Image (cartoon, coloured by chain):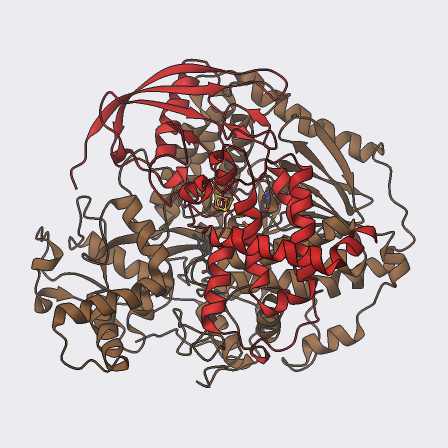
Chain colours: A brown, B red
Amino acid sequence: MPLNSKIPAGPIDAKWKTYKATCKLVNPANKRSLEVIVVGTGLAGASAAASLGEMGYKVKAFCFQDSPRRAHSIAAQGGINAAKNYQNDGDSTYRLFYDTIKGGDYRAREGNVHRLAEVSANIIDQCVAAGVPFAREYGGLLSNRSFGGTQVQRTFYAAGQTGQQLLIGAYQGLERQVALGTVTMYSRHEMLEVVIIDGKARGIIARNLVTGELERHFGHAVLLCTGGYGNVFYLSTNAMGSNVTAAWKAHKKGAFFGNPCFTQIHPTCIPVSGDHQSKLTLMSESLRNDGRIWVPKKQNDTRKPVDIAEEERDYYLERRYPAFGNLVPRDVASRAAKERCDAGYGVGSSKMAVYLDFGAAIERYGKIEANKQGKHNLSKDEIIVLGKAVVKEKYGNLFDMYEKITGENPYETPMRIYPAVHYTMGGLWVDYELMTTVPGLYALGEANFSDHGANRLGASALMQGLADGYFVIPYTLGNNLADDIRTKAIPTDHPAFVAAEKEVADRINKLMSIKGTESVESFHKRLGKIMWDKCGMGRNAEGLKQAIEEIKALRKEFWSNVRIPGDIDGFNPELDKAGRVADFIELGELMCIDALNRNESCGGHFREEYQTEDGEALRDDANYMFVSAWEYKGDSQYELHKEPLNYEVVHPSSRSYK
Amino acid sequence: MQHYNMNLNLKVWRQKNSKTSGAFETFKVSNISSEMSFLEMFDVLNEQLVAEGKEPVAFDHDCREGICGMCSMHINGRAHGPWSKNTTCQLHMREYKDGDTIVVEPWRADAFPVIKDLVVDRSSFDRIIQAGGYISVNTGNAQDANALPIEKQQADDAFAAAACIGCGACVAACPNASAMLFVSAKVSHLALLPQGDPERKTRAFNMVNQMDAEGFGSCTNIGACEAECPKGISLENIARLNREYVGSMLSGSAVEGLQQ
Ligand SMILES: Cc1cc2nc3c(=O)[nH]c(=O)nc-3n(C[C@H](O)[C@H](O)[C@H](O)COP(=O)(O)OP(=O)(O)OC[C@H]3O[C@@H](n4cnc5c(N)ncnc54)[C@H](O)[C@@H]3O)c2cc1C
Ligand code: SF4
Ligand code: FES
């Protein structure tokens, strides 16, 4: 089956306009009889469910947390991009489009990315109208900051809690629709299977996580907005419950998986402190606006950072990348940190950390503030007091979080940071309409592969989630449902529902009947270690081949020796986790297969065999300018389909931030 | 910072489901590192229970970063434990020393029935939001974001109120199990913004009514909520809610809103 991305014809800036002007519509009366299932209520799902509810569709929304307000989007810190050009610094739709394509190392689709840039400005308007309290300047207008990989200030933010404020905005819109009766919300529910009837996605099987009951739900279409799969590495900045299960079930039912190996390792996270570590905490990229990254010039230097003089410090990002300095994209910054630590310059007890230092920023802001207040004879200490107050206003919650976790005060001593798994650019393959290869089954937000290529720029995931949910799916879903207005709701005693439910029940029974000796947690940790060591920041063919064998063996062991206490019919978090880890194990294998297949380095995918002399990623456009879309063909068997990428507007060049 | 290991005694509330009654169960955990988070200490306990073939203690958590509002433990008599402006997941074991006994219970409130062990049902909070905690604007209707300047101080105050994570610690801390701090945070967030103005008259009234209908207690100005709130939501919000509530009663429009 050749992949059809359905990118509309015409010039890049006319594609989406033409699509919107010519797509099919569903009239209000018909919308009322069309049912839509939205799985996941993070930014993508909540915005989609609320918007579709407002339009008049009958929506059922699902999440596994106790409330839609707690989706992982809540944890996003730094900000959301939009091409508003409020700072008059040369930003435009084209520039956001260009930066995203380049930032993605020329592995994203031009058509999708341009649409994303086009709708970005509307997102900010929509969120402000809904009451999202973005940061403002004294004149009352919205404030912006910079993020990595760009030279303009286009990031909107709400202190270090941007995701929280955006999600609460979308959540309130969703609850309003719940109150109006257009959306029915199913919290503490986990989708465990897609139901396909006559080749179309027509519903799901969900487990009520409180009672353990399996439920059948019909929908004319099913939207998966279920987030990313970074937790395949066990340790990541994702929430504990983030998982791949929904996407993986869809994959096994025919949805191709796009670029599974494209993982983002975020450069600034609090380092691992010991074996007990259950998750890693991000220190927002916005900190690189003001923090300077360095390591000692001397190897194995154990002095305290304050005792290391300026000239003995190596600000390695500023040294290697003078044009972007501390604001190089994430993949570049992460690899540079790993390089320094591997070479013996790391700091802290584990030696696997670098410094993120606010000393210079505190002094700089202190001087500006002193001038503003007309105080010209202040001592250095007095200036530092003023500077700390400014830094506190910008990043206070992040500094507090750092201090709670490490017990160290980052206003006094530099933060110690190290890269950690953060985001997955890969996901379900979707066409321009966000439809997977299963008709009627869509994927939105981090769950799809679509817009970030091989590396995502900071503050672009929130933008994409809300673009998909607020502004794209309301059009593209209608275009397809217009052909479905005569389809009556299918009763859930249809044999396809019965069979799907049985499949789920059998699997749960099988898991519970193993009664082995090793905990789910332990298997998850072991998988994470294989993935981090062999499919993490650096990858090579030999390691990946080993990883594939190790994962196969781990999978066998899991299915013969996992121990899940508790009952099937009741609240049982160990059982929930077991199902997720089982899926992660299968996904891990596919990620390694994909990484092994891609004989080039691009973005977050760094194959050690393919690098330039000075250690930069070496892309191979002649052979790998395509999206890898994997089709499930049965146990451990996957067939590769290639979607060629055509760059009509931006001409791929070697990505330089020097 | 000096790191150390410790052994602890835990007294944890166990309850099979909302229909059965619960009781405390005592456990010992050893070699807990001072660098662990409180929930990582519970991970150790649960791994130990799985190894012994027993059922682990159920507790809610997700982000482990203090932002999702999912974690909810009442620790030695305090919602989210001893640190101020802190969630359970951000409490770290350096707070404790070798030999300590720690008592852990779920949130206690009629409107938060126990689902299992330390997990409670907080869907009443969602229903309070459904009663009016939003601005009625459909997708696609917005004007340019900078067409509506908002004074910085006012925007900052709205943000401070909007920082509520919906955890329910305020309810758990209150002897009356009142949800006033939670409700007032949302009413304040929206009342402080010009966008929230058109629905101001009905919002406070409808949300307070829903709070009462859910079985939360009434507010008698004790202030325990503010003391235990992990996000520093201030009592000033309750004062503002009271003004908004009175305002909506006087205008009568809330009553009309209800009758519709
Ligand atoms: C710490 C952190 C900080 C970040 N900061 C930023 C930032 O500053 N800017 C930025 O642009 N991006 C940031 N990101 C990335 C961004 O937050 C995410 O990519 C984005 O929020 C994902 O949104 P989503 O709607 O796709 O999924 P999520 O918010 O992850 O939501 C997933 C939803 O799916 C549900 N779900 C999952 N599986 C199932 C199932 N089987 N059944 C039922 N429901 C299910 C969940 O309950 C949840 O509701 C950050 C990420 C992290 C980890
Ligand atoms: S007001 Fe504070 S304690 Fe209450 S729900 Fe909000 S954050 Fe939690
Ligand atoms: S787990 Fe999210 S706030 Fe504690």
Horizontal arrangement in the rendering, residue B123 relative to residue A524 (left or right)? right
Q: Position of residue A635 (x, y in %)?
A: 58, 35
Horizontal arrangement in the rendering, residue A377 relative to residue B102 (left or right)? left
Q: How many marks?
A: 0
Quarter of the figure that contains the C terminus of chain A: bottom left
Question: Is residue A426 at least partly visible in the picture?
Answer: no
Q: Position of residue B29 (x, y in %)?
A: 31, 20
Q: Outermost residue toward the right?
A: A486
Q: Is residue A168 above or below residue A277?
A: below
Quarter of the figure that contains the N terminus of chain A: bottom right
Question: Is residue A253 at least partly visible in the picture?
Answer: yes
Horizontal arrangement in the rendering, residue A344 relative to residue A439 (left or right)? left
* Residue at the (88%, 63%) spot, across then down: A27
* Residue at the (30%, 78%) spot, across then down: A323
Q: Outermost residue toward the front?
A: B250
Question: Nearest the camera: A532 or A595?
Answer: A532
Question: Nearest the camera: A329 or A82?
Answer: A82
* Residue at the (43%, 49%) spot, across then down: B231
Q: Position of residue A544 (x, y in %)?
A: 39, 45
Q: Is residue A178 above or below residue B140?
A: above
Horizontal arrangement in the rendering, residue A204 relative to residue A531 (left or right)? right
Q: Quadrant of residue A510?
A: top right
Q: Position of residue A197 (x, y in %)?
A: 81, 42
